[in-house]
Image: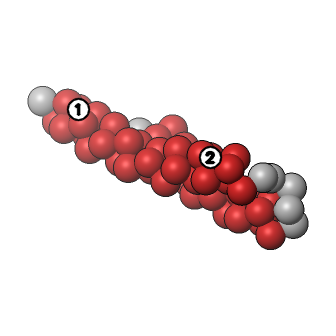
């Protein structure tokens, strides 16, 4: 479970650094949108894994 929490935190940190890269013009707009879409979905998927794993551990 600890790994999932760390992974979720890393996903949010990646969003933060992606924003900085955009401001500094280190990433093209098209790439930014593609990466941001993936990173926005990732924490939701990790939350699902956390919930599902917690549910299975209680069995």
Residue at 38% in and 49% down: 44
- Quadrant housing the N terminus: top left
Q: Position of residue 59 (x, y in %)?
A: 12, 30
Res 23 quadrant in image: bottom right
Q: Nearer the viewer, mark 2 or mark 1?
A: 2
Q: Which mark is residue 46?
A: none
Provide the secondary structure element on which disc 2 rests. Answer: helix
Up-down relation of residue 50 to residue 59 (above or below): below
Q: Name the residue carrying label 1.
A: 57
Using the image, tell me which numbered label, if any, was put on residue 35: 2
21 is higher (above) or lower (below) than 3: below
Give the image's coloring scheme. secondary structure
Kindly state the secondary structure of the residue where label 1 is placed: helix
Seen as rendered, the residue at the extreme bottom is 23
The residue positioned farthest toward the front in the image shown: 30
Which residue shows up at 62% across the image and 46% down it?
Answer: 35
Q: Which quadrant of the view contains residue 25?
A: bottom right
Q: Quadrant of residue 19?
A: bottom right
Residue 8 is at least partly visible in this image: no
Is 32 in front, or is 57? 32
* Drawn side of residue 16 relative to residue 50, left or right: right
Q: Is residue 32 visible?
A: yes
Above-or-below relation of 6 to 49? below
11 with respect to 52 (left or right) = right
Q: Residue furthest left?
A: 59
- Name the residue at 44% across, 48% down: 41
**Which of the two residues, 1 or 26, is positioned nearer the viewer here?**
26
Q: Mark 2: give few (<14), some (14-19) or many (20+) Cα within 10 Å.
A: some
- Category of crowding for the residue at label 1, using alpha-carbon neighbours closer than 10 angstroms: few (below 14), some (14–19), many (at least 20): few
């Amino acid at each position: 479970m600890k790994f999932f929490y760390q992974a979720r935190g890393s996903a949010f940190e990646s969003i933060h650094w992606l924003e900085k890269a955009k401001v500094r013009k280190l990433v093209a707009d098209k790439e930014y949108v593609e990466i941001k879409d993936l990173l926005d979905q990732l924490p939701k998927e990790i939350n699902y894994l956390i919930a599902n794993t917690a549910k299975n551990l209680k069995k």
